[in-house]
Amino acid sequence: MNQFIILAVVIALMIVAMLTSRKEKISKVETVKKSKNVEKDAWSKESFVNYGQVQQLRNELIKATEEKLGDDPEQVDQLKKIIDEWADLKVESFKDRRSWVRNPEKND
């Protein structure tokens, strides 16, 4: 009789341990899923343009800057540098977004 009680207690403890472990795994998976969804939403809201579009917009911005601030060459040069850096970042972000296709081993 005592053996049955001990066996029942051991089985009950094993069931409780398995259920607890399962709940922890489920919560971890839900956390990962939420973080992936947040990342996916961030990517979907990002504005991606191709190289030609970036260069066209870059040239338009530089032209507008030269027209509006032609009197102050220092500011024009500084704004040109900022516009060039912005264009480079836009192109790099487009490349990074598609890099997992070309270089899957670089993926985190």
Image (spheres, helix red, strand yellow):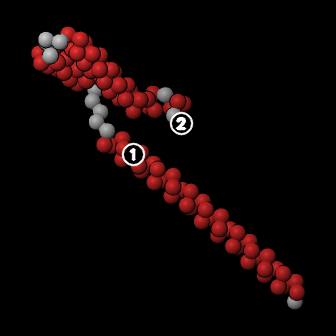
Residue at 35% from the left image edge and 29% from the top image edge: 94
Q: Position of residue 78 (x, y in %)?
A: 27, 16
Residue at 28% from the left image edge and 26% from the top image edge: 50
21 with respect to 9 (left or right): left
Q: CA distance from mark 2 to mark 1?
A: 15 Å
Q: Position of residue 36 (x, y in %)?
A: 45, 48
| Earlier-in-chain disc, 2 versus 1 | 1
30 with respect to 72 (left or right): right
How many C-alpha atoms fall within 10 Å of the one at disc 1: few (<14), some, or many (≥20)? few
Instruction: Answer yes or no: is residue 89 visible.
Output: yes
Compared with 75, 107 (above or below) is below
Hey, what amino acid is under mark 2? Asp
Compared with 57, 16 (above or below) is below
Compared with 106, 55 (above or below) is above
90 with respect to 24 (left or right): left
Camera-nearest residue between 42 and 51 = 42
Residue at 84% from the left image edge and 85% from the top image edge: 4
The quarter in which the N terminus is drawn is bottom right
Compared with 18, 6 (above or below) is below
Q: Secondary structure at mark 2?
A: loop
Residue 72: give its label: none
**Quick one: which residue is furthest to the bottom in this view?**
1
Instruction: Answer yes or no: is residue 63 visible.
Output: no
Q: Position of residue 65 (x, y in %)?
A: 17, 18
Camera-nearest residue between 74 and 38 = 74
Q: Which residue is mark 2?
A: 108
Instruction: Name the image quarter holding residue 63.
Output: top left
Q: Which residue is mark 1?
A: 40
Hey, what amino acid is under mark 1? Lys
